Amino acid sequence: MRTTFKTAGVGLALALSAAAGLAGTGPDGYPQRPLRIIVGFAPGGATDILARMLVKPLQDQLKQSVIVENRPGAGGAVVTGQLKSLNDGYTVMVNSVGPLAVVPHMGAKVPYNVEKDIAPLTLIAVQPNALVVNAALPVKDLKEYVDYVKAHPDKASYGSSGVAGGGHLAGELFRSYSKVPLSHVPYRGGGPAMNDLLGNQIPALFSTLPALADFMSSGRVRVLGVTGSKRSPLVPNVPTIAEQGYPGYEVLNWYCLVAPAGMPEPVLNFLNEQFVKAIKSPEVQRTMAAQGYEPATGSREDLRTFIASESAKWAKLVKERGITAE
């Protein structure tokens, strides 16, 4: 999946900036109190990192505090279901592929309707995962890993940041390609999953590269392959999984901003403009590039169309693999 998003200029409804008369303020002087960004994962994972990356430029633009609140549970699906009840005009959420494009297809009834309960704001970024193992595991590349797991079925488990997240999808798609009966172990975020990998509680993990940086440099983990269609500049010597005998394999995480449906259109348009501006700020662009993200922004309608396309794509894998809620 290669994102087709391009940064789009967004005209503010009701000439918001002019009406407010102040830089960084929207309709009727919005915002008049702190903005809250909900993250459906524990601190330390990619979704949390991205949310916190936006805090400073947003505070500079809005002249208000911006608070990140972590509410982990079911790979972000729990708080996605709560979002419609948080329609106070000051709450948004960093969301991702799982709750918006995968969980609704997994059989269990979810407490939200993506089309009716969620107002898209903008895509933030896309990023590959990486298959990583504890350095103590006696494998040095993907072929050795596959052979080892086939010979040691008790080592066939892999962790991820949660059910239906990018890591889970990467593992299930790799299972389909490799025919290795991998067993998924979901966690409440990337941080807890990494702790268990380091503690040898799980032998392998599909994780984002930023979460791996310190552990790669210290030699505690070994990266076997990245899930994108091209190599990551963070680990240019690590081949993609597709390069290592699985052509066509590709999984990218994507992260976006959404709000509760029902927020006033002028406010939604204003928030789109402010988040796009924050994402495009030089500071955020540099930080994203250093951590292997590909920034991607666009209009609210762009994101709505993108979510629908991703939903159709992953519904097929869910059905083929028989993935259900755990």
Image (cartoon, rainbow, N blue to C red):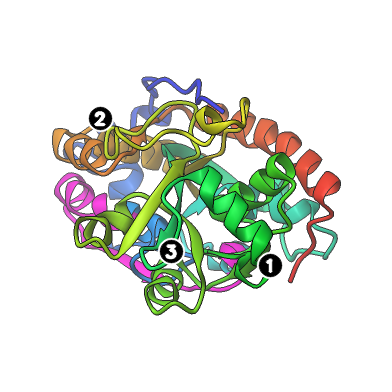
Between circles 1 and 2, the one closer to the viewer is 1
> Hey, which quadrant is residue 27 in on the image?
top left
In this view, the residue in front, 54 or 225, is 225
Instruction: Give the mark, 3 or 1, whose residue is nearer the N terminus.
Output: 3
Could you say whether the residue bearing mark 3 is in a helix, strand or loop?
strand
Q: Is residue 94 above or below residue 309?
A: below
How far apart are the two marked residues, 3 and 2, measured between alpha carbons? 29 Å
Identify which residue is drawn at 29% across, 39% down.
235
Crowding near pointer 1: few (<14 within 10 Å), some, many (20+)? few
Could you say whether the residue bearing mark 1 is in a helix, strand or loop?
helix
> Hey, which quadrant is residue 23 in on the image?
top left
In this view, the residue in front, 11 or 51, is 51
Q: Is residue 77 left or right of residue 122?
A: right
Q: Is residue 204 above or below residue 179?
A: below
In this view, the residue in front, 65 or 41, is 41
Disc on res. 18: 2
Q: Could you tell me which quadrant the C terminus lies in?
A: bottom right
Could you say where residue 114 lies in the image, as x and y percent from the top left? Answer: 69, 49
According to the picture, the residue beneath numbered tag 1 turns out to be 153
Kind of residue indicated by mark 1: Pro
Identify which residue is drawn at 68% across, 57% down.
150
Could you say where residue 325 lies in the image, as x and y percent from the top left? Answer: 76, 66
Disc on res. 38: 3
How far apart are the two marked residues, 1 and 2, measured between alpha carbons? 64 Å
In this view, the residue in front, 304 or 286, is 286
Could you say where residue 100 lies in the image, as x and y percent from the top left? Answer: 64, 49
Kind of residue indicated by mark 3: Ile
Identify which residue is drawn at 33% across, 55% down.
51
Kind of residue indicated by mark 2: Ala
Q: Tell me the magenta residue range.
A: 51-78
